[in-house]
Image (cartoon, rainbow, N blue to C red):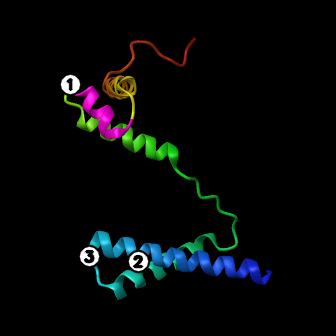
């Protein structure tokens, strides 16, 4: 492996440890040493399980949208479409669509079909 590639790998693992320790310290309130130890352990687990593999890390925009849509649905009170559109930075039409799609999915999961969908 070229020296430049080795440096990039080292930088990635160092960043992983750093970012993990920052999040652990902020979210769990642990001391700095414990947070850094957790970051090192996570980096070790990833190295052991994915070492040598080409791993693609997606930006996660579809996950972000799904989480936002779930939050919109959770905050929905029946008449606050405009408020939710402002809060979540989307249009009122999007809020209406989110409520409709999630409500329909919930209904379908609770109510079986009268027909066998596999037969056509």
Q: Find residue 10 and report its horizontal and vertical position in percent.
A: 63, 81
Residue in the picture at 25% in, 32% down:
83
Q: Which residue is mark 1?
A: 78
Q: Find residue 71 and report its horizontal and vertical position in percent.
A: 31, 41
Residue in the picture at 36% in, 21% down:
112
Q: Which residue is mark 3?
A: 29
Asked where in the image residue 5 lies, by quadrant, the reply is bottom right
Q: CA distance from mark 1 to mark 2?
A: 41 Å
Q: Quadrant of the N terminus?
A: bottom right
9 displayed left or right of 31: right
Q: CA distance from mark 1 to mark 3?
A: 37 Å
Q: Secondary structure at mark 2?
A: helix
Read off the magenta span. Answer: 80-89
Q: Find residue 74 and report its horizontal and vertical position in percent.
A: 26, 38
Q: Residue furthest right?
A: 2
> CB atoms at circles 1 and 3 under 8 Å apart?
no
- Near mark 2 (Cα within 10 A), the count class, few <14, some 14-19 or many ≥20, is many
Q: Secondary structure at mark 1?
A: loop
């Amino acid at each position: 492996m070229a020296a430049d590639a080795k440096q990039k790998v080292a930088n990635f693992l160092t960043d992983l440890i750093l970012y993990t320790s920052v999040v652990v310290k902020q979210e769990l309130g642990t001391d700095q040493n414990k947070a850094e130890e957790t970051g090192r352990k996570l980096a070790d687990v990833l190295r052991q399980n994915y070492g040598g593999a080409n791993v693609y890390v997606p930006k996660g925009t579809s996950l972000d949208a799904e989480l936002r849509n779930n939050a919109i649905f959770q905050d929905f009170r029946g008449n606050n479409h405009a408020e939710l559109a402002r809060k979540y930075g989307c249009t009122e039409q999007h809020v209406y669509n989110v409520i409709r799609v999630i409500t329909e999915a919930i209904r379908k999961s609770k109510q079986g079909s009268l027909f066998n969908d596999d037969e056509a």
